[in-house]
Image (cartoon, rainbow, N blue to C red):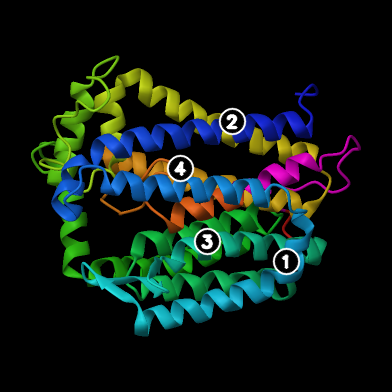
């Protein structure tokens, strides 16, 4: 690990993300052919849209990796207030699709504010943890101000309604407080107190209740028989890929059996076309990215930088776990995309911006010892 300097870490990280970009373009091109023909009368219409977004994501990585990350400290409060305003505007003026209002249209472009919100929260919590120092363990002075922003964003995202994204924002926020040295007793007490309300909200809508019922039935009865059709054919598609896959562009389950598989279920197309080897390769890339993040945290001596990187890899880990678990049937369908691979705009751009910042943190690594250690969760009140 000592041979890895900041420049090397940044280069490796950048290379891994570019590999995911290239795989994403390939997978989306294959998975979206039928949908493109139906929606745009052009077999590669969605692929072209995605390619444009990948190019924009690449540009954002280059730009944000060049901007000193410390500059963001001045704007995290402004950013999170703006996100709250945008989430409120989205509730009243947003674009409604499939019974939910999950995007806000601006100049003809649909923006999913919740994907921006999770990373704005990461940066603001990082700033608060840096500024508060040891007071982060104090309930009134440290914990409550951070919990306030987590709950505000969670409630506004739930109101769309988007339970899975709201729960991810809440979980990421609590984990960030934990690795930032927050009092574990405060965190556990909060989760225990709020969990019943989460369950009530989860079961309050018929479609969410039905989804949970189907999920439970999988483990009581036949796993495949009671699976959601998307999940059922996703499992079959992945199983049919074998060791090396059926080949690029040769998916037999796209669209006809797995609707919008170029989005949340892109992992199933990966398994079918690239096989077990392809799946393991992508998961290893994610693990390498997370591992590089941990190395950056250990090597950098700036708390704000540590927390940005820590929060960023927490968000990535949560998205990867939830998405892959959905695809293999271990979790109810959530609609959360797979980072850097799924078709999309807001999520892809935000992941890219965050990892551009992470590369910049790596580039600022110095050789001196870290003056303050995170992950200390003493029980100060």
Closer to the camera: disc 2 or disc 1?
Answer: 2
- Residue at the image position 14 percent from the left and 34 percent from the top: 253
Q: Is residue 356 magenta?
A: yes
- Residue at the image position 27 percent from the left and 40 percent from the top: 327
Closer to the camera: disc 3 or disc 1?
Answer: 3
**Tag shown at residue 15:** 2
Label 1 close to label 4 by CB (< 8 Å):
no
Q: Is residue 46 magenta?
A: no
Residue linked to disc 1:
128
Residue 137 visible to the viewer: no
**Secondary structure type for disc 2:** helix
Label 3 close to label 1 by CB (< 8 Å):
no
Left or right: 25, with 15 as reference point: left
Q: Position of residue 339 (x, y in %)?
A: 45, 44
Position of the N terminus by quadrant: top right
- Of callouts 3 and 1, the N-terminal one: 3
Farthest bottom residue in view: 92
Residue linked to disc 3:
118
- Other residues around mark 3 within 10 Å, as few (<14) / some (14–19) / many (≥20): many
- Of callouts 4 and 3, the N-terminal one: 3
Q: Main secondary structure of the magenta part?
A: loop
Residue linked to disc 4:
340
Front-most of residues 355 and 324: 355
């Amino acid at each position: 690990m000592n041979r890895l300097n900041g420049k090397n870490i940044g280069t490796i990280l950048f290379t891994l993300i570019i590999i995911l970009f290239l795989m994403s373009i390939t997978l989306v091109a294959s998975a979206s052919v039928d949908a493109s023909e139906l929606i745009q009368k052009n077999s590669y219409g969605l692929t072209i849209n995605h390619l444009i977004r990948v190019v924009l994501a690449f540009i954002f990585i280059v730009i944000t990796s060049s901007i000193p990350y410390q500059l963001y400290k001045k704007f995290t409060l402004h950013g999170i207030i703006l996100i709250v305003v945008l989430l409120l505007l989205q509730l009243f003026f947003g674009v409604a699709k499939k019974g939910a209002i999950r995007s806000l249209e601006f100049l003809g472009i649909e923006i999913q504010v919740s994907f921006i919100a999770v990373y704005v929260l990461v940066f603001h919590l990082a700033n608060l943890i840096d500024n508060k120092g040891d007071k982060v363990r104090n309930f009134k002075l440290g914990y409550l101000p951070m919990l306030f922003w987590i709950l505000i964003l969670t409630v506004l995202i739930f109101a769309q309604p988007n339970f899975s994204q709201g729960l991810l924002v809440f979980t990421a926020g609590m984990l960030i407080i934990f690795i930032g040295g927050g009092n574990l007793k405060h965190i556990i007490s909060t989760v225990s107190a709020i969990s019943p309300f989460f369950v009530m909200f989860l079961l309050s809508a018929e479609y969410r209740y039905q989804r949970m019922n189907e999920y439970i039935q999988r483990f009581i009865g036949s796993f495949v028989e009671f699976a959601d059709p998307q999940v059922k054919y996703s499992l079959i598609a992945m199983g049919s890929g074998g060791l090396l896959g059926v080949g690029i562009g040769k998916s037999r389950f796209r669209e006809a059996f797995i609707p919008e598989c170029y989005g949340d279920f892109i992992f199933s197309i990966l398994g079918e076309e690239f096989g077990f080897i392809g799946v393991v390769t992508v998961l290893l890339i994610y693990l390498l990215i997370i591992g590089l993040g941990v190395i950056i945290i250990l090597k950098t001596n700036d708390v704000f930088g540590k927390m940005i990187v820590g929060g960023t890899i927490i968000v990535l880990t949560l998205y990867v776990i939830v998405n892959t678990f959905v695809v293999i049937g271990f979790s109810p369908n959530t609609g959360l995309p797979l980072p850097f691979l799924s078709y999309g705009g807001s999520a892809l751009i935000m992941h890219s911006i965050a990892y551009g910042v992470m590369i910049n943190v790596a580039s600022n690594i110095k050789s001196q010892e870290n003056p303050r250690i995170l992950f200390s969760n003493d029980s100060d009140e």
